[in-house]
Amino acid sequence: MAKGPYSDKVMDHFMNPRNMGEIEDANGVGEVGNPACGDVMKLFFKIDDKGIIQDVKFKTFGCGAAIASSSMATELLKGKSVEEVLELTNNAIVEALDGLPPAKIHCSVMAEEAIEAALKDYYKRIGQDPSIVDEMKAKIKAKVKS
Amino acid sequence: MIYLDNVAGTKPDQRVIEKMLPFLTEKYGNPSAHFYPLGREAFQAINEAREDVANLINADADEIVFTSCGTESNNLAIKGVANSFKYEGKKHIIISEIEHFSIQNSCAKLGNQGYKTTKLKVDNNGKIDLDQLRKAISDDTLIVSIIHANPEIGVIQDIEEIGKICKEKGVLFHVDAIASTGHIEVDVKKFNCDLLSLSAQNFYGPRGAAALYIKKGVNISPLFDGGFQENGYRSGSENVPGIVGLGEAARIAKLEMHQYAEKMTHLRDKLIKALKGMFSFLHITGDEKDRLPGHVSFWIEYIEGESLLLWYSLKGIYAASGSACSSNILAEDEEDLTASHVLTAIGVPNDICAGSITFSMSKYTEEKDIDEVIKVTPEIVNRLCEMSPYYKKQ
């Protein structure tokens, strides 16, 4: 059959989304939206005392690419430390999905932004300045460049 | 497979294909070659097709010009009168907010030549307010162009009344009847129109064959400069097989369309009733009464159109959506994703990229197909609602 706009991986995550739902006692929640097309992605983190993502769930209003990006992101996040989580770029999500159409790359960017938003919320809840997330992110970017 | 995207193109009727085949094989003459039988045969075939098309819309054969697609017919109508010497000086065009891109963009381009376009608003059912039209027509108005039936929301405009107003005011009137021709009555005399576009692929004919009705006495300037085919209105060697197919599709439609309209209207009303009963947050788009037979369109709160479309496709149901996300999947840039201007015009909130779906049936659609749609819809919608951060259990 002729190929559709999405890879088999994207379709698999679209049809069988992993970690879909909410975490009632989440300690980090991030919601981001895309004004271009109205998509909304919400991530729920349960982070333990050691800063490890014990559980993660998502809810997404959006297209196939948005749902698959959210689902893939949750798979890549589980069990990781906060530092490791911030190293996850949208490119890594796209790669893990075997690619996205150019017009849908923004869906993976949204997932990266949702991760940051959820971590900021987490730091706020534990009484720290959420801007630490931006600093950590900047350091990671500088490291990647050098 | 349940094909419910017939506004995007119908399955050709087998009789149409059989009539075309000889013109793709042994009857390959050019209709402009009058001095040997092969050419004359082709010439005769396209003129028979012209008779059949004229007959379907109550026109005369010499008022039919064959084109390559509906978009070309619409371009030829709008740009053709704008560039005609006969109407020089009039620089105002009136269309509606829910016209096809080929009308909207033709008018936009004419803006470079100093033409102003008024876009008439439509109400929440997609209908044009006739008083608004009366007020919009001025001494400077050249042409009014209105879509008979909108393919996305199915709404049928009161073309006869619009035609009367245009006649009274002495302005040209073009009807985009691409979605309606061959399904419901299209009569250029009753419509009082000067120009009318139709396309074969929308009523069981082939792709690549369409026509523009040009009333006697109306003058248009051609889009192509070339030879004398189609009286010079559309030069270029004729697509003989396509035109023959269009003619046969028109002949069949004239005989059979009323019977199929009845069948499709029944299925349409059954599906609309079922959908409305399923979810309080499902909204039918387009007028429910003045509506194409076999046309069902709606949007659902909380969920997005492309996801709906993909799920229906996975269930073997092929439909269309007007959501931004599904608009231009091959685009290189997300900026090229925009929600349908038709849905925006009838007040569907485009900022949330609403979950819009259009089902359009054909004469081949069966009751069991519609029953299947009714069966799988709750499953799909519930699944996507569960995933939606907007949705709260009702």
Image (cartoon, rainbow, N blue to C red):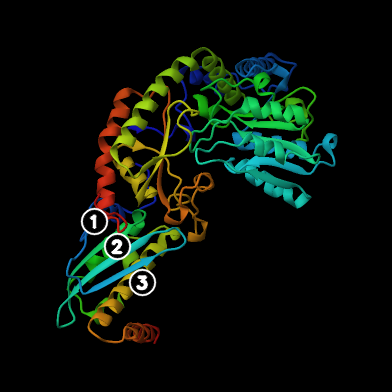
Report the side of B67 relative to B143 (left or right): left
**Label 1 vs label 2: CA separation?**
8 Å
CB contact under 8 Å: marks 1 and 2: yes
Disc 1 marks which amino acid? Pro
Q: Residue at x 47, y 25 (%)?
A: B12
Q: Residue at x 56, y 25 (%)?
A: B181
Is residue A49 positioned above or below B324 on the image? below
Q: Nearer the viewer, residue B15 or B131?
A: B131
Q: Nearer the viewer, residue B247 or A136?
A: A136
Q: Quadrant of the C terminus of chain A?
A: bottom left
Check disc 1 and report the residue beneath it.
A17
Looking at the picture, how far across and down is residue B277, in whole percent? 30, 35
Report the side of B65 relative to B263 (left or right): right
Q: Which class describes the residues within 10 Å of circle 2: few (<14), some (14-19), or many (20+)?
A: many
Earlier residue among tags 1 and 2: 1
Label 1 sits on a secondary structure element that is loop
**Label 1 vs label 3: CA separation?**
19 Å
Q: Nearer the viewer, residue B223 or B163?
A: B163
**Same-subunit check for callouts 1 and 2:** yes
**Label 2 vs label 3: CA separation?**
11 Å
Label 2 sits on a secondary structure element that is helix
Disc 2 marks which amino acid? Ser
Looking at the picture, how far across and down is residue A99, in whole percent? 36, 60
Label 3 sits on a secondary structure element that is helix
Chain hosting mark 3: A
Check disc 2 and report the residue beneath it.
A70
Q: Which mark is residue A113?
A: 3
Earlier residue among tags 2 and 3: 2
CB contact under 8 Å: marks 2 and 3: no
